Amino acid sequence: MSTGTLTIDLAAVAANYKALAAQSGAGTETGAVVKADGYGLGAGRMARALAQAGARRFFVAVAEEGAAIREALGRGPEVYILGGHMSGDTDMIHDLDLVPLLNSIEQLTRHFEALPKNPFGIQLDTGMNRLGLEPAEWAAVAEIVLPKKPRLIMSHLACADTPDHPQNAEQLETFRALTQGTGIPRSLAATGGILLGSDYHFELTRPGIGLYGGLPFAGAQNAVTLDLPVIQCRDLEVGESVGYGASWVAEKPSRIATLGAGYADGILRSLSGKGHVFAEGVPCPIVGRVSMDMLTVDITGLRRDPKTLELLGPDQSVDQLADLCGTIGYEILTSLGPRYNLRYAGRAG
């Protein structure tokens, strides 16, 4: 038995892509980020749905992830590697026609020596101080690199989820100064950057979390539902406790359901004793500690014992659950475990 059913609404993913593409504007192409196994939802299925919705450029973290996208989509679309050309990646980059986003002098040297005829892109550091050529490095190599016609020049915003943060404008100004007049397509905006407005869009935007229903895209359609199976129900008398550490004690006669999923399945232990799961819209409090394979829920208010209870869906988004856990929706999505039964619903086209 699986620990639950994770349902991904392909129509919602496609609708979110089209909405973000519309916000990017008619003169801007919109790609799609499908790293981390499509944010935990299955990279191949997400890539196919997004391709049907119109995406032609896809972004992954490492070359191995690019292989999964090539298997799903074939040779047509461009697949960019955000981590660049790492040692040991040369054969895979060549054989699968992947496009590394070169982010250091070392990577430039590796790529130009090993694959001088293969496509590449450039990643610039405009203030995030994580990946990319620094302005002085770019100034030193731009005259060598630009004649080789990189497919893309990109950078990444550090504070796009905080629209009024001054670093957004600072990075925008730096990116413009470094790329003006190159004639090469440019990309600065992920989901948050798209929402900052047209100044940040350039020739290509590359949404990620917003495609899958997450903030900061408040207008996103919910794309994920997670139903957890009920293994057993039992009655507790006043004073009886539940789970490790006896952290929850019944103050009245209660009926408790044990669900077959836990922190091994991405339901973070910090959710212990917080929040709710839902039975057809009726909230049921999570009680006791989340353990490796199980969590416990107070179903006293239900008319009958349920077979499943909903953790994610119309009644609770990934970001609402993340708030309860003290984290972000990205972590919730990408932590969902491999034991779920994946179900894809809706049509992307």
Image (cartoon, rainbow, N blue to C red):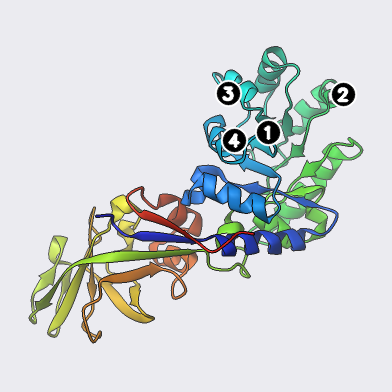
User: Which type of secondary structure does the marked residue at label 2 adopt?
Assistant: helix
Residue type marked 2: Pro
Which is more N-terminal, label 4 or label 3? 4
Question: For the residues carrying marks 2 and 4, which lies nearer the camera in this image?
Answer: 4
Which labelled disc corresponds to residue 147? 2
Residue under numbered circle 4:
70
Locate residue 81: give its quadrant: top right
Which is more N-terminal, label 1 or label 4? 4
Residue under numbered circle 3:
92
Residue type marked 4: Arg
Q: Is residue 8 left or right of residue 262?
A: right
Residue under numbered circle 1:
132
Residue appearing at x 34%, y 57% in the figure: 268
Mark 3 and mark 4 in contact? Answer it, CB < 8 Å.
no
Which is more N-terminal, label 2 or label 3? 3
Q: Position of residue 144 (x, y in %)?
A: 84, 20
Question: For the residues carrying marks 4 and 1, which lies nearer the camera in this image?
Answer: 4
Q: Is residue 56 above or below residue 249?
A: above
Local packing at callout 1 (Cα closer than 10 Å; few below 14, some 14-19, many 20+) is many
Q: Position of residue 62 (x, y in %)?
A: 55, 33
Distance from Cα at disc 4 to Cα at disc 1: 25 Å
Locate residue 135: give its quadrant: top right
Residue appearing at x 58%, y 64% in the figure: 12
Which is more N-terminal, label 4 or label 2? 4
Q: Is residue 34 left or right of residue 178?
A: left
Give the position of the C terminus as an image quadrant.
bottom right
